[in-house]
Each structure stands twice: as structure tokens, then as C-alpha cells.
Image: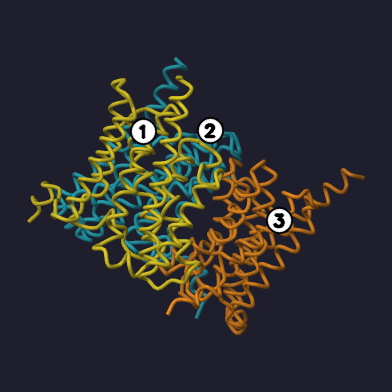
Chain colours: A cyan, B yellow, C orange
Amino acid sequence: MMQGERELGQFLLLVFDLLGIFVFALSGGVLAVRKQLDLFGVLVLACVTAVTGGIVRDVLIGAIPPAALADWRYLATAMLAGLVTFRWCGLIERLRNPVQLFDAAGLALFAVLGTGKALAFGLTPFAATLLGIITGIGGGIARDLLVVRTPVVLQQTELYAMAALIGSGVVALAAAFGLPQFPAMVVGALLCFGLRFMSIRRGWRLPVAGTRE
Amino acid sequence: MMQGERELGQFLLLVFDLLGIFVFALSGGVLAVRKQLDLFGVLVLACVTAVTGGIVRDVLIGAIPPAALADWRYLATAMLAGLVTFRWCGLIERLRNPVQLFDAAGLALFAVLGTGKALAFGLTPFAATLLGIITGIGGGIARDLLVVRTPVVLQQTELYAMAALIGSGVVALAAAFGLPQFPAMVVGALLCFGLRFMSIRRGWRLPVAGTRE
Amino acid sequence: MMQGERELGQFLLLVFDLLGIFVFALSGGVLAVRKQLDLFGVLVLACVTAVTGGIVRDVLIGAIPPAALADWRYLATAMLAGLVTFRWCGLIERLRNPVQLFDAAGLALFAVLGTGKALAFGLTPFAATLLGIITGIGGGIARDLLVVRTPVVLQQTELYAMAALIGSGVVALAAAFGLPQFPAMVVGALLCFGLRFMSIRRGWRLPVAGTRE
């Protein structure tokens, strides 16, 4: 029964990981279509956006070879998302700011999952929080650098790294206090997504930023 | 005698690896001269273009420290190529599109050699194919990012990552079916170079790209 | 007593490492303020500038997880520098070219410390020199790429990578000849900083660069 629970937990982690891959790849694919790249450019940008954060995390915690290279399902999922974007780009474009929305969902999923994997590899809650942030923002940074624009993470007036920090921090704090991990991941992901979403839609910002003239 | 054959094989691999370093470094050097960088900038760009792909591959397969840092001959070769470009840039410029040509040769050599090294480190044919592509395109991406231009790999109408995929895939498939590696590498490299060459000279593209409006 | 000396040595190394983190983070923070990023952007750019070189070095020598993630003092120092820049940016701006000055100090400290750590991990003097250069220039490259400008290391008429090479080379040569490491680090850092400083203030360049028309 515990065996069954563990298998269920690992299955759920895989499902959410692939979901994060999918939505991040969509954000990369939409940007590539906007920049008028051809099919292969769309696929490459979708894959880079989806797996870079996780690969950097795996390298930093010593999980070699990285999951995104060892397991074909990750890149297959990213490519599927790239194909979807390429085929139905008109439909996706009609949604308001879809790049930012998918990006926010990917950020939330990757931040909490990255923190969880770092904890599983024995890192401290502090380091695991950082690795969650890196997992979350790495793909978006690589995506933006490849099309030569300033990464979203540095753009003014948006809570981006802060959202990832809160999502990762909830998971790391739960681990530090011995609380169950899965509910902490759900709470962390919802907080991260909600914060990012409100930042985009309602213009939420860091209060401190207002202190500059 | 088998000892002699193994030594010959390793010697040939080293020769082709250094050849890949040399032509990739030329492509970086030519771009640096065009951007009017000084001698050190030319050397840095030549080295970065030549070794980044291999270093990323070595990090991802756990070959630490990476060959390009542990063995002085790699960077010495890249610097030699940088000096050659700096001295005879006028001559090299007169050739038609030399950056792209050297880049295509480097892509082909690195894709097959990167796949071979990943297989030698026990990775699956799927992961080895990806690592071959990364070895092939990593240096060019770093080169383009350093001079702040969109990487060639994402530019429209060119078969770039696709060429690397085919070169790497041939080597990985040969390994999966237990076929000898060296002929597979030769075939893979020729296919990759030929595809990239025809894409540049004849405007070959992905047929699917034409399905967009 | 030898125990006491070793502890003193490690304490001094940590102090200088954190000093390098601080000045590099200042250079990142000043650039972020200039680019009108908000508080979080300033903190992110300060941290990225301060720790990227060291993280890349640690990955390449197999020191996993990297010191900057495992030890909270590194990022705390970088964030403190980011806050200082954000609060007193007017004061810092009035200094002449403060980004370049802090950058030069960080370059010198990181080049010699990176070389020292690589030697301590058993790498050859050749590889250790390269890793010192990477430690020194990595953060600045990441900083410049994030704000989408050509990295300082490639800008014309400046001795940048050359300064790092000389600083690292002194430490590596001292190790190769069995000379004591700490004085070599001091000499190497002073040479590196002095060369970079004179390059900025007096326009020192590579003599070979003058041979181009």
C-alpha cells in the first residue's frame, strides 16, 4: 500500500512535470511564431524554453545525465506543444497575452517541482529554494536570450522572480519543518501562479519599487 | 594488433575533433573580424565558438573536467585558428560565405563526435542524439549570443538543427543496431554537411514550412 | 598551530571571495540601475553578476552543489550589494565609471581565487588558469547578456580577458613551481587589477591590435 502510494506520488510528479514542460513549451512556441520563425525554429524554441531550467538544475545538483535528456517523454512533450502552437497559432494568439499566461503556469510548476527534486537530492532548504527559482526562470531566460530580447525576469513592474521565490520557499519551508510535501507543492504552485497572474492583470508590483522617484 | 587498432581509432577521433575545433574557431574568428573586434576579441570568440558545445556536452554526460579544459591542444588549436583569421581575414573574406561554410563543417564533425562520446559514456541512443545536436549547435549559439544577434539555429529558411539531428541520428542508430561506429560517423558527418551546404547554396528548406500561409 | 594557520587561510579565502562577490554585485547593480530596472531586477542582476562565474567553475571542476548555492553567505552578500546600489545609486553614479572599477576588482579577485580552487580540486595548472579566467569573466558576460549588450570582454581596445589570464597565470605558475600560493594570489590579483585599471584609464591596449590598419 505504501508502495502503491509512492508509485502514485511519482506518477503525479511526472504528470505535473510534463504539464510544466507543455505550458512552458507553448510559451516558447508562441513567441517563436510571433517572431516568424519556421517550424524547426518553433520546435527548437519550444524545447529550449521547456527543458533549460530543469537541465541547469540537474547539472547543479549532480543529477547526470539530466532527466530531460535521459527520458524521451520530456522532449516529446515539448515538441508536441511546439507542433500545437505552430498549427493553431491563430487560435492561441486570440487569447489575451497567452505567452505570459502559459509562462506563469510553467513558472509555478517548475519552481515547486525543482525545489522538491533538489530536496530529494539532499540539498538544504536554502539551496533547494534557489534551485526551484532557477528551474522556474531558466527556461524563460534562455527563450528570451535566443530571440535577443531582455528576459522577462528583468522587466520592470512585474513580480517574476519574486513569484518563483515564494512558490519555492513554501515547499522548502514545509520540508524544513517536516510537513508533508505534496500539499506544500500545491499551495506553493497556486501562490506563485496567483502572484504572477495578478502582477500581469492588475499591475501588482513590489511596494518598495515605488520608493524610487 | 587490436591495441594498435584502438590507438589508431583514438588518434583519428582526436584528429577529427581538433579539425572540428579548427573550423568552428575559424567561423567565430571571421565573425569577430567582421564585427571589428581586436585581436583578443577574435581569439575569445574563436575559442568560445570552438569549445562551448563540447564543454556543455561533457558537463551533461559527467565527463569532468571537460576535455577542452583538461587537454591544452583543444584551445591551442582554436587560438591558432583565431590567429589565422586575424592575419588573413582579407583572404578568407573573399571566399563566399566562409563563416557559414566553416560553421557547416564544424557542425557535422561535432554532431557525430558528440554522439559518439555520449554513447561511450553509456547514454542511450536517444540521449546521445540530443547530445550530438547540443555539441554541434552549442558553439554557434554562444558565438551569436556574444555578438548579440539571433543564433543561426533559429534563423528562418535554413536546415541547421535538422542537419545536426540527421548526422547524430545516423551514429546513434548504428549503435542501437550494433553496426560499426566509424563508418556511421563518416556517413553521418557527410549527410549533415551536405544537407547544411545545400540548404545554404540551393535554399533547401523544410517542406512543412511551406504549409504556413 | 598548523591547524590554526589553515583555518586562518580558509577564513582569508572566504573573506576575499565574499569581497569579490560584493564588488561584482555592485557592478551588476549599477548597470541595472542605469537600465532603470526595479528593485528586484537590481537584486537579480547583482546576484547573477556575482555568482555566475563561480557556479560555472564549480560545475566544470565537479564541485557539486556549487558554493554559491550551498552557502547562503554568498547570495546574502550579493543581495546586500544590490540593496546598497539601489539605495545610494546617486552617490555611486557620481564616481567616475564605477561599473568598470568594481568590475575590475571583481575580475582580479575571482581570477586568482578561481585558479586556486581549481588547483585544490586537482586540475592541472593549464586547466586551472582557464578556470580562473572563466570565474573572472563569467559573471560579467552573464550580466551583459541579460541586458542585451555586447559583453565587455569582447569590446574593442580593452585588456579584459588578458588581465584575467595574467592574474590566473601567476597563481598557476606558482603552483607549478611549488611556490607558496597566498603571495602568488596577492601578486596575481594586483597585476590583474592594475592591468585592467590602466587599460580603462590610460587606454592601454594590446600592441598587436595596432597592426591592423
Percent x, y of residue A141: 40, 56
Q: Nearer the viewer, residue C172 or C64?
A: C172
Where does label 2 land, which residue? A120
User: In this image, A37 relative to B24: left or right?
Assistant: left
| Circles 2, 3 touching at the beta carbon (< 8 Å) | no
**Kind of element beneath mark 2:** helix
Closest to the camera, between mark 2 and mark 3, is 3
Taking the image as drawn, is residue C87 in sight? yes
- C73 in relation to C85, above or below: above
Residue at the image position 40 percent from the left and 62 percent from the top: B29
Instruction: Estimate the x, y position of residue C175 in percent, counting from the top left.
Output: 73, 50
Three-letter amino acid code of the residue under disc 1: Ala
Seen from the viewer's position, the closer of residues B108 and C200 is B108
Mark 2 belongs to chain? A
Which numbered disc covers residue B127?
A: 1
Question: Quick one: SS at disc 1?
Answer: helix
Q: Can you tell which quarter of the image residue B172 is in?
A: top left
Is A85 rendered above or below residue C30? above
The quadrant in which residue B165 appears is top left
